[in-house]
Image (tube, grey):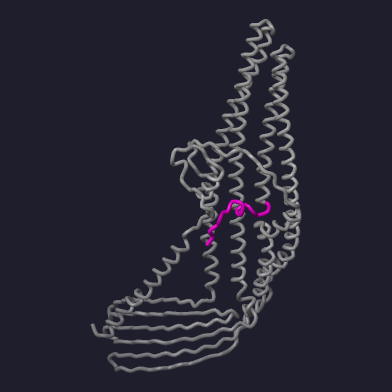
């Protein structure tokens, strides 16, 4: 094999050597882009896995941490962010040079001759921010035949296209990039809203478990008091101070309390499973909400709350971005309805060399061109279809934002008013419990002295249970109102010192 044939055979190997580092770099880039982030607590929170240590007590902080780490909805949102962030990188890469490597190697054998042909054709292109397109291509072709001889051809092509109407100007050319950046802002806000809503759901589920546990304690305490009353009744009957048939009322009340205990235990299991599902933990895990139920009064002015919500609430801020998105979509839609008129210019140079039975030689040639290319659609209404939709969307965004502002104001007013109402209800329920306890104690003393009836004591027992449940419900409602206030104002992550880590 002569030198020319060896060079023709080595050309595909050279092409593969050029492609391999680029493919490895692209693989590394895809690997980095596919690494999803995760939210975390900024504070130095004790992250020891309580459940792995066979501990069953779970605080609200533990539940929030486990939710950030395990909740499937949050993990899914962060996986979506991998694709969304890569979309932005693709848009930002639009104005970087592009390189396309292509080549072939082919060996043909026929009855008259055997031919080996290799080509290499790298092409690079660049888009400017004003729509200018530059391209440069180099092509080399090597042809070596057993009898026909050797032939080599290579050349360089340069071209430039400057749009005058469609695709011309900074506003049009950079509109996709600016739209991608606005979309990225909206994606970040949606991620914040998603995490905040999930954390609020976990907090609510945790408090429902607390409610069920406290209701179980209330019923169990009531059952203990009923059994104590039964002993008092037996003592009064033995002393001849109470009719024997009146003990039936106490025994019926005990049966009712035992039924309530079973129902309360069932409710504890229901709420435990609901919380475990949100935390993405094994449903057989035995956990117990360990936080103490307590509350402190929080007061905030409606105007202050509204200003804070307008600056922080992610769903509302994402809605405000809609007008910018609609404006950019209108710019691109109007551009598509324009005529395609562009200035074009270019030049190319070709060199060739041959060596066969008739002789050998070489040549060089070049040429250039310049002109205008025009493409005018006539009678095609589809070219304006996107523009009509985009104009309608721009006008509709004004209505959407006005409605969003009003809805936000109403939500803020509702949560601020509800917060004050829930606190007043909690204070009233506390007084009701204290009075019910005092009333029951007095009636028990009267029963011991023979000045009251068994029925009256059981009635007051029922009043105490109802008032304790009312206080519990009022306290849970007030705590949930605080969480809803944080969610409405967009302050849930700040309240819990949560970092999104959305790099």
User: In the image, 470: left or right of 217?
Assistant: right
User: In the image, 82: left or right of 394?
Assistant: left
Give x and y (percent) for residue 59: 54, 42
Give x and y (percent) for residue 395: 74, 65
Q: Which residues are magenta?
A: 488-503
Instruction: Name above or below for residue 166 compared with residue 186.
Output: below
Q: Quadrant of residue 439?
A: top right
Give x and y (percent) for residue 221: 61, 25
User: In the image, 81: left or right of 118?
Assistant: right
The residue sitting at 53% across, 56% down in the picture is: 78
Judging depth in this view, the residue of 473 and 195 nearest the camera is 473
Judging depth in this view, the residue of 177 and 292 nearest the camera is 292
Query: Can residue 19 be seen?
Result: yes
Looking at the rendering, in which quadrant would you find the N terminus? bottom left
Q: Count the labels in the image.
A: 0
The residue sitting at 65% across, 18% down in the picture is: 253
Give x and y (percent) for residue 56: 49, 37
Asked whether residue 3 is drawn in magenta, I would say no
Asked whether residue 492 is drawn in magenta, I would say yes
The residue sitting at 73% across, 32% down in the picture is: 431
User: In the image, 392: left or right of 24?
Assistant: right
In the displayed image of the protein, which residue is found farthest to the left? 1
Q: Quadrant of residue 172?
A: bottom right
The residue sitting at 30% across, 90% down in the picture is: 355
In the displayed image of the protein, which residue is found farthest to the top? 240
Query: Can residue 381 be seen?
Result: no
């Amino acid at each position: 094999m002569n030198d020319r044939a060896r060079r023709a055979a080595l050309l595909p190997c050279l092409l593969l050597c050029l492609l391999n580092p680029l493919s490895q770099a692209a693989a590394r880039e895809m690997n980095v882009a596919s690494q999803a982030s995760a939210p975390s607590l900024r504070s130095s929170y004790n992250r020891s896995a309580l459940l792995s240590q066979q501990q069953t007590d779970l605080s609200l902080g533990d539940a929030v941490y486990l939710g950030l780490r395990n909740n499937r909805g949050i993990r899914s949102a962060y996986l979506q962010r991998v694709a969304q962030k890569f979309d932005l990188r693709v848009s930002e890469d639009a104005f970087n040079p592009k390189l396309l490597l292509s080549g072939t190697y082919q060996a043909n054998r026929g009855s008259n001759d055997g031919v080996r042909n290799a080509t290499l054709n790298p092409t690079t292109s660049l888009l400017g921010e004003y729509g200018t397109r530059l391209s440069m291509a180099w092509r080399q072709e090597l042809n070596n035949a057993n009898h026909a001889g050797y032939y080599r051809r290579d050349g360089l092509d340069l071209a430039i296209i400057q749009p005058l109407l469609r695709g011309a100007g900074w506003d049009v050319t950079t509109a996709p990039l600016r739209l991608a950046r606005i979309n990225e802002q909206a994606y970040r806000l949606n991620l914040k809203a998603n995490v905040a809503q999930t954390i609020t759901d976990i907090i609510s589920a945790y408090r429902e478990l607390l409610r069920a546990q406290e209701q179980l304690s209330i019923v169990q305490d009531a059952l203990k008091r009923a059994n104590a009353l039964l002993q008092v009744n037996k003592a009064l009957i033995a002393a001849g101070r109470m009719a024997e048939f009146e003990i039936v009322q106490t025994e019926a009340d005990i049966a009712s309390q035992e039924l309530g205990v079973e129902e309360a235990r069932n409710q504890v299991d229901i709420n435990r499973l609901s919380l475990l599902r949100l935390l993405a933990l094994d449903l057989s895990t035995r956990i117990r909400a360990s936080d103490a139920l307590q509350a402190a009064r929080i007061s905030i002015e409606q105007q202050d709350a509204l200003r804070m919500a307008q600056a922080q609430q992610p769903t509302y801020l994402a809605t405000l971005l809609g007008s910018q998105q609609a404006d950019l979509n209108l710019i691109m839609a109007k551009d598509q309805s324009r005529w395609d008129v562009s200035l074009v210019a270019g030049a190319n140079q070709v060199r060739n060399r041959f060596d066969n039975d008739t002789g050998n030689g070489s040549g060089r040639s070049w040429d250039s061109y310049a002109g205008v290319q025009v493409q005018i659609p006539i009678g095609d209404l589809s070219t304006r279809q996107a523009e009509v939709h985009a104009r309608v969307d721009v006008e509709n965004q004004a209505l959407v934002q006005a409605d969003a502002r009003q809805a936000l104001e109403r939500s803020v007013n509702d949560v601020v008013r509800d917060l004050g109402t829930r606190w007043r209800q909690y204070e009233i329920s506390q007084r009701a419990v204290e009075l019910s306890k005092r009333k029951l104690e007095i009636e028990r003393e009267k029963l011991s002295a023979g000045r009251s009836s068994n029925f009256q004591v059981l009635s007051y027992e029922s009043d105490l249970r109802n008032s304790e449940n009312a206080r519990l419900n009022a306290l849970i409602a007030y705590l949930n109102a605080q969480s809803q206030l944080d969610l409405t104002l967009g302050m849930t992550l700040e309240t819990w010192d949560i970092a999104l880590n959305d790099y």
